[in-house]
């Protein structure tokens, strides 16, 4: 197990180097001149002279590899440079946005796990019943609803009509409810189906038959089936954590949530390269770490996996 | 199973009853003392000497020596002024009862420090001629300040009243004696004090109780950031927002505006025409470099369709680039009213022959052009489609290219376009600052004019206008410039745009400033 983890940790290094290099390369291939854009987003008319001045200020006049290495060097110390747009340290911008996003992602994850597991297990146990069919129909509809529409609909019902939650912002503790529900709606159907199908598959396995023959109680059997079928779903859920953290742009915009998604999108529109680079690197790191943690977790539940590798 | 079904049904019914009952229960207006304003943008860095902050917020906190009001220059922090006969020296007598909100006195010394700090960063202000015209800032005595110019730059007083950069920040906020990189606080003399700012969430402005002029009528303004316009509408219906205010579809799109106009809970406001909306025809592009093609396009575009069908009559039709009420622009110019036959005739005469595919050509060159626009503005796309149909009628094929903002601006700067939008800056920038900007290569106007035979003369004349002390001579030169541009058909004038605002019924005193970028919160009350 230990060697497995170490091996995986070592693998992270080339992956991250590769990602950071490609991120840097791709961004530098963008047709807009970052020096010029930096002037423009501050509503300064670009002229030959001030473009040259800004290029020098931002270090854009140096060769590509020099810039890459100096960026990697400072990134290793947690220094991602300053935003081209407002000249504030990128690290500070992220420090401001990440807590909001993590908070939203955590609440979403809780909703996601609770709802998917309950509904998924219910669907498996009552397979083919009218209730399951209704749930299935609702899930299909939910998957088909785009997030921005669901968000506005929920806001209209629960904030405007029922006045239970505030429409937007992060001002009161209840503010998180609507965005978290909206965000989880996109994932719940997938996991409900996943859990349901896994459970149904497991129910037809030999160990269940054997348990039945042995005369074990149904509840005990269900517990075993549940434990065995939850693994794949957990892996999938674990993998969606970085996705939750990275991909909340639409919802953050609708609910005016001051998170990383908004930071990144406005950075893309403004060609704020230091922020985009830091974003890619941080998200890549998050993906790799989450992947690793999930694998370790699964290996811990299922000792077979650890031994095999 | 039945039980589950019943409970599901019960919940659903309860839900629908609740939705039915609790609507419209949120109209309290009696004792409100705070204006909740929603904007799609954060106020950002409101350093008055820089350009990254929201102008409306900068205007709340910082004031200038003069202000532009009702088309005139009025005293603000300067009580009165005297201009020397040669137009080179402006002596300002400052108000003696003004303090920055941190207690620092406002005096000639503070004015000089600010003016010097602005000039120290002159490259940033390249769009503004005046920066290069300032020779010296002189403290005459405690409350007298003298501005010495290199030439008799005529828009001096107007430009001193612009929202930025000639506004005053407390000397205590300077960092290393300068303001060009950063400031340590946002302390001004204005009717509002920025008391709290949570980036990307909200900013709170409280009333400046020691304000020298008419104090604000409500105690605070809460500037909420809501990036999605749909959300803003819902928040307004929910009573969380009292005011929407925005120039050119920034906060409110036309459809939402119309919808709110019909509802009894809201009041809608429309300003006087404030800026010009036009289409640039690039005189330096393969097809549109032919002045006859440009002229034909003028005749072909059906403006009435655009005004009534797309802009819903919310803007006035424009026959000339600048409205007649803009200073120096009340001149007789040739107008091109919609006339398909004239358009066809013009093209026929110029040798553009209709091909078998319905597209004209001349010397092997197809009459095919591209209209590029910023895809974030859906309305511009619709206008483009209307023009596309008009041009197809006269045998010009127009492609529409909606692009992301930065890509659009790249194209504008390099001149790589046939047709593009052009918005003038509106009062008080029109005509002087707008026309000045025609000489700057980064502007689409410059690029579109570069193919003109007399472009060099045009730029020279504009430079001369700005420093011509004599009003009559200046007017004549303006007329020459505007006539030439009009006859060369570089702009297809479409409409004169208006600023829109929507408030809840209880909010009173909503008015428009001269500049479409300012909001006079201090005049509003419940």
Image (cartoon, coloured by chain):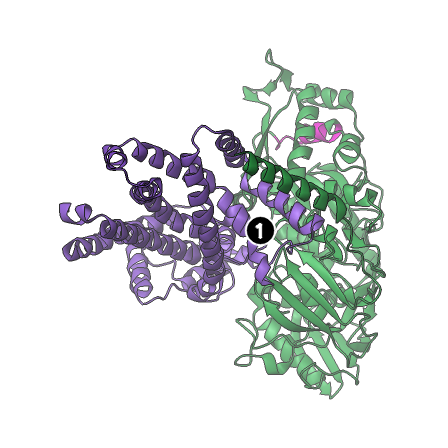
Chain colours: A purple, B green
Residue B138 rendering spot, x and y as whole percentages: 68, 82
Side (left or right) of B321 relative to A95: right
Image height check: is B77 above or below A114? below
Outermost residue to the front? A215
Residue B398 rendering spot, x and y as whole percentages: 61, 27
Classify residue B189 by image quadrant. bottom right
Q: Is residue A246 magenta?
A: no
User: Callout 1: helix, strand or loop?
Assistant: helix
At 69% across and 18% down in the image, what residue appears?
B348
- Closest to the observer, B385 or A63: B385
**Residue range corresponding to the magenta coloring:** B288-299
Q: Is residue B289 magenta?
A: yes
- Closest to the observer, B106 or B266: B266
- Closest to the observer, A15 or B406: A15
Image height check: is A159 above or below B109? above
Outermost residue to the top? B356
Q: Is residue A16 visible?
A: yes
Chain ID at mark 1 = A
Residue A184 rendering spot, x and y as whole percentages: 49, 46
Residue B41 rendering spot, x and y as whole percentages: 62, 56
- Closest to the observer, A45 or B102: B102
Image height check: is B16 above or below B517? above
What secondary structure do most residues of the magenta stretch adopt?
helix
Residue carrying label 1: A178
- Quadrant of the frame with the C terminus of chain B: bottom right
Q: Is residue B52 visible?
A: no
Side (left or right) of A292 relative to A107: left
């Amino acid at each position: 197990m230990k060697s497995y983890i170490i091996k995986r940790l070592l693998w992270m290094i080339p992956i991250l180097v590769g990602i950071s290099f490609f991120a840097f390369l791709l961004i530098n291939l963008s047709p807009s001149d970052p020096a010029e854009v930096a002037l423009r987003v501050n509503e300064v008319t670009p002229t030959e002279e001030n473009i040259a001045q800004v290029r020098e200020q931002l270090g854009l006049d140096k060769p590509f590899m020099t810039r890459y290495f100096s960026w990697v060097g400072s990134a290793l110390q947690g220094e991602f440079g300053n935003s081209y747009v407002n000249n504030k340290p990128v690290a500070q911008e992220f420090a401001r946005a990440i807590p909001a996003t993590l908070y939203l992602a955590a609440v979403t994850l809780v909703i996601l796990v609770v709802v998917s597991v309950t509904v998924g297990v219910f669907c498996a146990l009552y397979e083919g019943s009218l209730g399951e069919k209704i749930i299935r129909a609702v899930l299909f509809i939910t998957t088909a609803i785009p997030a921005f529409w669901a968000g506005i609909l929920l806001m209209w019902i629960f904030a405007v009509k029922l006045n239970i939650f505030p429409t937007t912002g992060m001002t009161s503790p209840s503010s998180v409810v609507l965005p978290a529900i909206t965000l989880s709606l996109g994932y719940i159907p997938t996991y409900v189906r996943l859990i349901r199908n896994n459970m149904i598959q497991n129910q037809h396995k030999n160990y269940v038959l054997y348990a039945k023959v042995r005369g074990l109680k149904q509840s005990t059997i269900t517990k075993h089936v549940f434990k065995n079928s939850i693994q794949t779903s957990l892996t999938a859920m674990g993998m969606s954590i970085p996705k939750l953290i990275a991909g909340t742009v639409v919802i953050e915009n609708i609910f005016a949530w001051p998170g990383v998604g908004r930071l990144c999108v406005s950075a893309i529109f403004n060609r704020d390269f230091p922020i985009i680079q830091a974003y890619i690197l941080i998200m890549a790191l998050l993906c790799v770490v989450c992947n690793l943690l999930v694998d370790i977790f699964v290996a811990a539940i299922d000792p077979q996996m650890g031994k095999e590798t | 199973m039945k039980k589950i079904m019943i409970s599901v049904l019960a919940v659903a019914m309860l839900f629908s009853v609740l939705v039915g009952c609790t609507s419209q229960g949120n109209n309290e207006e009696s004792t409100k003392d705070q204006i909740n304003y929603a904007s799609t943008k954060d106020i950002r860095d409101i350093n008055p000497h820089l350009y990254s902050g929201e102008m409306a917020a900068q205007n709340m906190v910082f004031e200038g020596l003069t202000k532009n009001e009702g088309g005139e220059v009025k005293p603000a922090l300067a009580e009165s002024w005297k201009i020397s006969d040669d137009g080179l020296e402006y002596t300002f007598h400052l108000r003696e009862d003004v303090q920055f909100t941190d207690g620092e006195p406002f005096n000639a010394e503070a004015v000089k420090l600010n003016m010097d700090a602005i000039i120290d960063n002159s490259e940033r202000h390249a769009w503004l001629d005046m920066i290069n015209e300032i020779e010296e800032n002189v403290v005459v005595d405690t409350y007298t300040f003298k501005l010495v110019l290199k030439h008799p730059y005529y828009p001096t007083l107007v430009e001193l009243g612009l929202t930025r950069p000639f506004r005053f920040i407390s000397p205590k906020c300077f960092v290393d004696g300068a303001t060009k990189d950063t400031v340590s606080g946002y302390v001004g003399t204005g009717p509002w004090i920025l008391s709290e700012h949570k980036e990307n969430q909200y900013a709170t402005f409280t009333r400046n109780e020691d304000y020298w002029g008419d104090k604000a009528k409500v105690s605070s303004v809460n500037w909420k950031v809501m990036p999605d316009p749909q959300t803003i509408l819902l928040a307004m219906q929910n009573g969380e927002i009292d005011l929407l205010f925005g120039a050119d579809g920034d906060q409110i799109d036309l459809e939402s505006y119309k919808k709110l106009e019909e509802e009894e809970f809201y009041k809608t406001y429309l300003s006087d025409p404030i800026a010009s909306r036009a289409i640039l025809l690039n005189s330096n592009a393969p097809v549109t470099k032919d002045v006859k093609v440009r002229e034909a396009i003028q005749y072909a575009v059906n403006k009435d369709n655009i005004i009534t069908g797309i802009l819903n009559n919310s803007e006035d039709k424009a026959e000339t680039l600048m409205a007649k009420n803009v200073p120096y622009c009340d001149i007789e110019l040739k107008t091109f009213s919609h006339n398909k036959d004239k358009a066809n005739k013009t093209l026929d005469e110029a040798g553009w022959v209709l091909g078998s595919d319905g597209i004209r050509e001349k010397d092997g060159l197809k009459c095919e052009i591209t209209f590029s626009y910023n895809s974030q503005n859906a309305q511009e796309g619709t206008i483009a489609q209307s023009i596309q149909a008009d041009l197809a009628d006269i045998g010009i094929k127009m492609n529409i290219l909606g692009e992301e903002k930065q890509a659009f601006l790249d194209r504008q700067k390099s001149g790589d376009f046939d047709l593009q939008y052009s918005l003038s800056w509106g009062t008080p920038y029109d005509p002087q600052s707008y026309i000045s900007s025609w000489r700057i290569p980064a502007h689409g106007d410059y690029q579109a004019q570069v193919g003109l035979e007399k472009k060099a003369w045009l730029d020279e004349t504009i430079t001369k206008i700005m420093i011509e002390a004599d009003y009559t001579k200046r007017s004549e030169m303006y007329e020459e410039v505007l006539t030439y541009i009009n006859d060369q058909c570089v702009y297809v004038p479409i409409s004169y745009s208006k600023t829109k605002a929507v408030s809840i019924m209880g909010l009173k005193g909503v008015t428009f400033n001269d500049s479409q970028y300012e909001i006079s919160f201090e005049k509003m009350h419940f």
